[in-house]
Amino acid sequence: MNCSKAESLLSSYLDGEMSASDLRSLREHLNGCSCCASELEGLRRVKSLVGSMGTPVMSEAFEARLHDAVFGKPQPVAQPGFLRLGLATGLAAAVLTLGFLQFVKSSKSGHMVARSTPESRNMDLVRDQSYFAIGDPISGQAPVTTISNGGR
């Protein structure tokens, strides 16, 4: 057995967790190797010191804080999805309300657009053609002016 293999088995040796064949090989190695025997003695001292330390005593306040931190009730956390949904719903309701109020206001003032009749469609067609003859309002090439339509 080499030193590397022996060092990997020292903790198992101290804990009594070795097979009979590994135990016999390790004892033979320790009898012939002072480095590994010294390492074994160092591990024995550490194990003895740790065993003699005892269990630390915690204050009741510390135990309570620890218990609450580990097992306490989780604090409610605002779900970002619900927040966004609420804002979107509120905004949609506001837009619909404003649109409805605008509709009611325009219907009371008499500025409702009447349904077109075949005669008015012809007039609208003439008016629309006059817009295009003057210029394109979207591109800004010419100003848009309406053609007077008598009493209309």
Image (cartoon, rainbow, N blue to C red):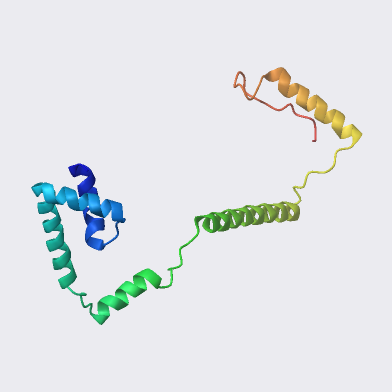
Q: Decide: is 85 above or below 128.
A: below
Residue projecting furthest to the bottom: 60
Number of numbered labels in the structure image: 0
For residue 70, which quarter of the picture? bottom left
**At 72% across and 24% down in the image, what residue appears?**
131
Q: Is residue 26 left or right of residue 65?
A: left
Q: Is residue 106 left or right of residue 92?
A: right
Using the image as rendered, state which of residue 101 and residue 31 is in the foreground: 31
Residue 137 position in % (x across, y down): 64, 24
Using the image as rendered, state which of residue 132 and residue 15 is in the foreground: 15
Residue 144 position in % (x across, y down): 65, 25
Q: Decide: is 103 above or below 49.
A: above
For residue 14, which quarter of the picture? bottom left
**At 15% across and 72% down in the image, what residue appears?**
52
Q: Is residue 33 left or right of residue 25?
A: left
Using the image as rendered, state which of residue 109 and residue 17 is in the foreground: 17
Residue projecting furthest to the right: 118
Residue 33 position in % (x across, y down): 11, 47
